[in-house]
Image: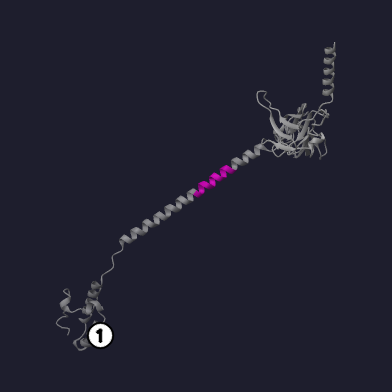
Amino acid sequence: MALRYLTVLLIVLCCWASLNALVLVTPSKTTYEGVQGGKTTLECKYTLAPEDIGTLDIEWFLVAADSQQADQMIINYNTGVVYQDSGPLKDRVHFTSSDPLNGDGSIDIINLRESDTGAYQCKVKKLPGSQNMKMRLNVYIKPAKTRCFVDGKQEIGSDFALKCDTKEGSAPVTYSWEKISGLEKLPPSTPDASGAVLSVKNASQAFSGTYRCTSRNKVGTDECLLILNVIPPTNTAGIIAGAIIGTLLFLIILGILIFCCCRKQKEKKYEKEIQHEIREDVAPPKSRISTARSYIGSNHSSLGSLSPSNMDGYSKARYNHVPIEEHERPASQNPSFSAPKYHGLTVV
């Protein structure tokens, strides 16, 4: 009987100790949301009991997505010292409280990245007490670089579509259109499920104006503007005819230029051939010796008609004009020279 009472007492004491040991405070939420580039706080608060006399140890883990892999510790508090892991959250995670001994083991994560999305675990130990809890963090990207454009011809009577998309932004992203200028409201059309496409049927000029598309997800919005100008249909037949006429004119002008260039080249070639033929017919110039001989012969014929009385003075004057090169050479050095005879008169 005494043994039974002793066993019951031990059970009661253990239960009382467990009820008054370290306890984690239930957080306000277990799923947290953040924006890329922003900041978030993951809560982990606790209470201690007098029986918790061991060293306080607070550990935060990034839970592995694969159960076959180990969880990665990102920050740890032990005996007043903070340790950080060299993983992807290094220098971006800190304890919210400057002294986690006061019952607050929450952490702040700054400069959030989409890759920070995942499950996190907080574990608090102060022997004999030990508790842990898990929470979820989702990091989203705001819509950005949203653009608007028209798919089709902006002509009266045509069918086209106003389209909107965004280069950045976490899914799901939804879109909405509105007309902010012009006489009419939105064209009578049913947008697609996401609202990104606004189909226009049998367009009229009243559809012209400025449109705005807004893209949004759960963490932000973005927008773009589109100016729509519906014009009369273009004269396709006239454009084609003009293009054909322009091409023909170009070919005609090109042919004229080629013909003129060829004719010019033929004329230059003909002029060169004529000049070459004329040069072949020209007699070569006479030498100085031939000139001198003809000069002396002409004087010889002139002297034959003169009388002996005036022959002496005239002959001397005339022979002074004989070319120097031929006249000054002695007769012994000029084998072709022979003393002229003038009908019985001898020149001294």
Q: Position of residue 224 (x, y in %)?
A: 75, 39
Q: Which residue is mark 1?
A: 317
Residue closest to the eye, 20 or 168: 20
Instruction: Classify the position of the N terminus by image quarter.
Output: top right
Determine the residue positioned at 38% across, 57% down: 272
Specify how the rendered protein is coloured: one colour
Q: Quadrant of residue 196?
A: top right
Secondary structure at badge 1 equals helix
Determine the residue positioned at 25% across, 70% down: 287
| Side (left or right) of 240 relative to 36 | left
Q: Position of residue 121 (x, y in %)?
A: 74, 29
In this rendering, is residue 248 above or below 347?
above
Instruction: Classify the position of the C terminus by image quarter.
Output: bottom left
| Side (left or right) of 60 relative to 260 | right
Q: How many C-alpha atoms fall within 10 Å of the one at disc 1: few (<14), some, or many (≥20)?
A: few
Q: Main secondary structure of the magenta part?
A: helix
| Side (left or right) of 266 relative to 308 | right
Q: Is residue 147 visible?
A: no
Q: Position of residue 20 (x, y in %)?
A: 84, 25
Say if the magenta span includes residue 249.
yes
Give the magenta range. 246-257
Q: Amino acid at mark 1?
A: Ala
Residue sitting farthest toward the left? 344
Residue closest to the eye, 181 or 317: 181
| Side (left or right) of 201 relative to 251 | right
Say if the magenta span includes residue 20.
no
Q: Is residue 236 visible?
A: yes
Q: Quadrant of residue 309?
A: bottom left
